């Protein structure tokens, strides 16, 4: 590491903040040395707050029907080859019950933007989930909705909401999305969710088309300012039926480097080692944890629909039973010295960091 790299890394570790140009410098001049140094400190600060706990969230992919046409995504509406499905409320509740028996205390309902899952349907389901399992957190990941809708879902009992910002750069956002989607609405959603008292997750893909170190630096500055409760980052992985089919995937190396930086920017953040990371490398999720991540999200969706929720190619674990993916992750985590905890894993109960 040169002097400047060392100075920036040390300031990030002590002050949790850098200027946007400094984040860019860190990214452009990264080396194995710098990555190891940042990972060591990322793991240290995480350990101070969370010990060796890795939190699990049970992911239920409720539908792959989506009105949006994001250029990177395999379930975009113009993909005619996508075999569409929608789980019934009974199926969703049964998955959640199975998850509960397996020890999950957070269920994440994720799906495309599908009008079927209206406020009425979702609120009914959230109420049932909450009354069946009052000790569980309900996380939603259902894309962009109105303030009134987010308010109704929150009122029904939803605790958390995941909505990746995708990129903090307006022009980059426009190159990844069709004209009818807007950067401003994305940001409006994140701000509404926060104002309504949700624990909010944002995030972005590493190595998405047209992304440069400058956009990544903007993402880091956005995260520094927004201080999300959760932050989902994973490599872009091309899907064969999208306009980005021939684009190269993001790398394990850069994703891990950014995970360490994000941990240092906001030490208490809940940071998943994503399925996409496990998809580009067999030990991707372990490497993510060792870089500073502390969440894994095994799949609880029924096996019959697993391979249909295909946002990108070669997604892992599409054939595993819920119990299998849970015990598989438990083994993987214990092999690297971490323990999966079934705790609700609430950032607000962690040690306060200002
Ligand atoms: N590669 C990696 N991640 C993707 N997502 C969508 N498509 C892809 C892809 N091709 C991510 C987006 C979205 C989340 C649910 O999945 O960031 O917000």
Image (cartoon, helix red, strand yellow):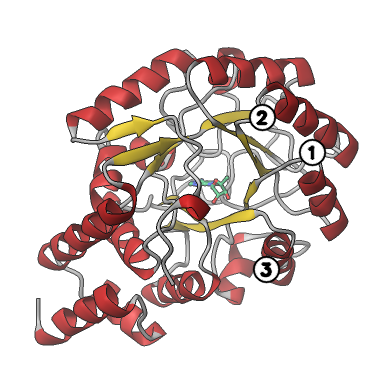
- Can the viewer see residue 117? no
Q: Dot 3, crowdedness within 10 Å: few (<14), some or many (≥20)?
A: some
Residue that mark 3 sits on: 187
**Residue 287 coordinates in the image, percent (x, y):** 24, 44
- Can the viewer see residue 202? yes
Are dots 1 and 3 in contact, CB under 8 Å?
no
Quarter-wise, where is residue 35 in the image?
Answer: bottom left
Q: Nearer the viewer's eye, disc 1 or disc 3?
A: 3
Q: Nearer the viewer's eye, disc 1 or disc 2?
A: 2
Task: Using the numbered discs, state the Cα–Cα distance from disc 2 to disc 3 in whole angstroms.
Answer: 31 Å
Task: Name the one closer to the observer, 44 or 292.
Answer: 44
Task: Name the one closer to the observer, 37 or 197.
Answer: 197
Report the quarter where the N terminus lies.
bottom left
Q: Dot 2, crowdedness within 10 Å: few (<14), some or many (≥20)?
A: few
Task: Name the one closer to the observer, 20 or 96.
Answer: 96
- If you read the primary sequence from the N terminus, does the residue marked by circle 1 or circle 2 appear first? 1
Residue that mark 2 sits on: 134
Are dots 2 and 3 in contact, CB under 8 Å?
no
Residue that mark 1 sits on: 114
Q: Nearer the viewer's eye, disc 2 or disc 3?
A: 2
Task: Assign a secondary structure to mark 2.
Answer: loop
Q: Is mark 1 within 8 Å of ligand 1?
A: no
């Amino acid at each position: 590491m040169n002097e400047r790299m060392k100075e920036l890394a040390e300031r990030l570790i002590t002050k949790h903040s850098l200027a946007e140009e400094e984040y860019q410098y860190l990214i452009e001049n990264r080396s194995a040395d710098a990555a190891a140094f940042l990972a060591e400190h990322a793991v240290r600060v995480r350990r101070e707050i969370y010990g060796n706990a890795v939190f699990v969230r049970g992911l239920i992919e409720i539908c792959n029907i989506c009105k949006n046409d994001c250029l990177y995504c395999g379930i975009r509406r113009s993909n005619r080859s996508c075999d569409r499905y929608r789980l019934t409320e009974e199926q969703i509740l049964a998955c959640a019950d199975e998850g509960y028996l397996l020890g999950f205390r957070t269920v994440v309902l994720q799906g495309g933007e599908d009008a079927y899952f209206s406020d009425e349907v979702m609120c009914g389901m959230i109420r049932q989930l909450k009354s069946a399992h009052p000790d569980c957190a309900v996380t939603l990941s259902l894309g962009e909705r109105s303030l009134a809708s987010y308010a109704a879902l929150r009122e029904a009992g939803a605790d958390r909401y995941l909505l990746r910002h995708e990129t903090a750069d307006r022009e980059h956002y426009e190159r990844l999305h069709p004209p009818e989607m807007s950067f401003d609405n994305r940001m409006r959603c994140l701000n509404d969710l926060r104002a309504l008292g949700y624990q909010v997750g944002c995030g972005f893909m590493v190595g998405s088309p047209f992304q440069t170190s400058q956009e990544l630096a903007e993402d880091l500055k956005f995260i520094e300012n927004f201080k999300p409760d959760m932050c989902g980052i994973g490599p872009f992985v091309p899907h064969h039926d999208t306009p980005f089919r021939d684009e190269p995937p993001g790398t394990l190396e850069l994703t891990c480097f950014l995970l360490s930086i994000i941990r240092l920017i906001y030490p208490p953040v809940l940071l998943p080692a994503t399925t996409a990371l496990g998809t580009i490398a067999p030990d991707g999720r372990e490497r993510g944890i060792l870089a500073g991540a502390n969440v894994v999200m095994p799949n609880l969706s029924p096996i019959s629909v697993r391979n249909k929720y295909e946002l990108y190619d070669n997604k892992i674990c599409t054939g595993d039973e819920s119990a299998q993916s849970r015990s598989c992750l438990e083994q993987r985590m214990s092999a690297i010295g971490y323990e999966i905890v079934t705790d609700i894993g609430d950032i607000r109960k962690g040690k306060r960091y200002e």
